[in-house]
Amino acid sequence: MVHGEICAVAYRPQAGKRMSAADTAKRTKGFIGEFKVFALRGNVMDMAVGVVIGAAFTGIINSLVKDIIMPIIGLFTGNLNFSNFAIKFGEDNSLAYGAFIQAVLNFVLIAFVLFLVIKFFNKLRNEKKDDTPAAPAEIDILTEIRDLLKDK
């Protein structure tokens, strides 16, 4: 046999079996074909949807932090805004370390709020799982079938 024939046989899908993405990529000719296989896999599409939803969710979280949480924190800190803190050297140059502190503070607040939201959704999901009745065990089902057959 020629090496090409062995490879052709190795990549031929068996009857009734679906080819894996790796096998499809091996059979696809060229860079464009490989990219098509990669881009249209389910995981990539799920990730794309997650990125879009994440971008929309970022706006909601940013608004929550900026419009609700920061004013409450401002009550305790006297509306302290770190972004105005800077070390000036020369007339036009400054080291705006306060903007960095404000960005870190915003990140911590956003991460904390996101943690609370995810914890809330996980709690809801776990409550839904607990509400579903447990399926009868295999032995219980077999016992019921045996009893029904005895009655006939």
Image: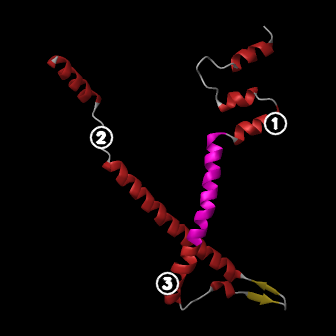
Which residue occupies 19% across, 22% down? 148
Q: CA distance from mark 2 to mark 3?
A: 45 Å
Q: Amino acid at mark 1?
A: Phe
Q: In the rendered structure, which disc, 3 or 1, sits on the residue that comes first in sequence?
A: 1
- The residue labelled by disc 2 is 134
Q: Residues within 10 Å of mark 1 (few under 14, many from 20)?
A: few
Image position of 131 with respect to 115: above or below: above
Looking at the image, residue 59 sits to the left or right of residue 139; the answer is: right
Q: Amino acid at mark 2?
A: Ala
- The residue labelled by disc 3 is 72
Image quadrant containing the C terminus: top left
Image position of 55 with respect to 3: above or below: below
Which residue occupies 39% across, 57% down? 124
Nearer-the-camera pick, 94 or 23? 23
Q: Residues within 10 Å of mark 3 (few under 14, many from 20)?
A: few
Residue 21 placement: quadrant: top right
Magenta stretch mostly in which secondary structure? helix
User: Badges 2 and 3: C-beta atoms under 8 Å apart?
Assistant: no
